[in-house]
Image (cartoon, rainbow, N blue to C red):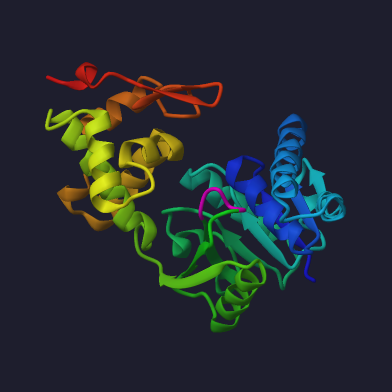
């Protein structure tokens, strides 16, 4: 088994660490905040408890999984002996570029440097390093322990050998890897985010309310949840950031973010993470925000 480092202990980072550790990989989980790391390990433990309760994991396997995870507050220490790094920090271009500059300095020369970015160019990230052939995208889906897809994104210089190794590692995690090329939004968000943005426009223009829009897509299109509820789960700030990447990268006005989305993010209504978006959130329950609030 190779040694893996995961940078970022938020929802995606702790999910990625969980999956690697559960499948036998030693994982160094890295964050600048020890309390954040402690919270992440607690979250992994709770998610493993759910698997135990369902009978899909034994108590011994849970203990072994947690035993494979170490936490680190310095990047240099965490990546010292790894063969793969998966960066899962905030979706911010400058932050990711700085992380990859640091990784290039501190990670072993042969290590693969992967990003879990949902939209930022892998080619741009790779250009911040002196090893662009070893930089690749591993875009896991949320929640990571449940969702089977991994988008494997080849940058302009990513080598065939690195791509094949990451595809194989994804299969070892019992995921289904899909190789895609490095264009704005890749495949998943190139298709998903304009749909969410159009749903927000449909609300903004008064065509229908929140519940009606989500019900049409659930019952009419067999989606497991409506696009506005999904936007709340993703985070409206993340949706806005991805739409801006699409708009800037593809130069087409059809990718312009809806003004309602922009205003909600500026107002701090980010969805589940802030407790209020298109729905209000609290104590694990969901209460519909009245659609009339959004009508002209």
Could you say which is closer to the camera, residue 92 or residue 61? 61
Is residue 104 visible from the viewing direction of this image? no
x%, y% of residue 43? 70, 38
Q: Is residue 143 magenta?
A: yes
Q: What residue appears at the point 75 percent right and 48 percent down from the top-left corner?
A: 52
Label the magenta part by its dominant secondary structure.
loop
- Magenta-colored span: 141-145
Residue 227: where, in percent of width, then height?
Answer: 32, 42
Q: Foreground: 191 or 105?
A: 191
Q: Which residue: 38% across, 58% down?
A: 188
Q: On the rendered structure, is 177 left or right of 225?
A: right
Q: Quadrant of residue 121?
A: bottom left
Give the vertical position of 205 relative to 117 (above or below). Answer: above
Q: Is residue 251 left or right of residue 275?
A: left
Q: Position of residue 61 (x, y in %)?
A: 83, 56
Residue 243 seen from this side: yes
**Image quarter in which the C terminus is found:** top left
* Residue drawn at 34 percent across, 39 percent down: 240
From the top left corner, tell me how far across and down residue 2 is, in percent.
78, 69
Q: Quadrant of the N terminus?
A: bottom right
Relative to 161, 70 lies left or right:
right
Magenta run includes residue 201: no
């Amino acid at each position: 088994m190779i040694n893996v480092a995961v940078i970022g202990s938020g929802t995606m980072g702790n999910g990625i660490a969980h999956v690697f550790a559960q499948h036998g990989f030693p994982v160094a989980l890295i964050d600048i905040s020890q309390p954040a790391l402690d919270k992440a390990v607690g979250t992994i433990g709770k998610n493993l408890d759910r698997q135990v309760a369902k009978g899909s994991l034994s108590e011994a396997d849970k203990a072994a999984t947690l035993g494979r995870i170490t936490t680190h507050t310095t990047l240099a220490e965490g990546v010292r002996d790894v063969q793969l790094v998966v960066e899962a920090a905030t979706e911010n271009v400058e932050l990711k570029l700085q992380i990859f500059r640091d990784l290039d300095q501190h990670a072993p020369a042969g290590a693969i440097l992967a990003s879990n970015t949902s939209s930022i160019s892998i080619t741009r990230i790779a250009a911040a390093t002196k090893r662009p052939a070893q930089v690749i995208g591993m875009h896991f889906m949320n929640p990571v322990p449940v969702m089977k897809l991994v988008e494997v994104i080849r940058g302009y210089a990513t080598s065939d050998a690195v791509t094949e190794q990451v595809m194989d590692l994804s299969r070892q995690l019992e995921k289904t890897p899909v190789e895609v090329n490095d264009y704005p939004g890749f495949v998943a968000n190139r298709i998903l985010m304009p749909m969410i943005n159009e749903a927000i426009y449909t609300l903004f223009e008064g065509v229908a309310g929140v519940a009606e829009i989500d019900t049409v897509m659930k019952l009419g299109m067999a989606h497991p949840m409506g696009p506005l509820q999904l936007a709340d789960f993703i985070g409206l700030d993340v949706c806005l950031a991805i739409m801006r990447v699409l708009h800037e990268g593809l130069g087409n006005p059809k990718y312009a973010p809806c003004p309602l989305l922009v205003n909600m993010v500026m107002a701090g209504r980010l969805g589940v993470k802030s407790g209020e978006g298109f729905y209000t959130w609290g104590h694990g329950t969901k209460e519909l925000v009245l659609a009339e609030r959004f009508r002209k």
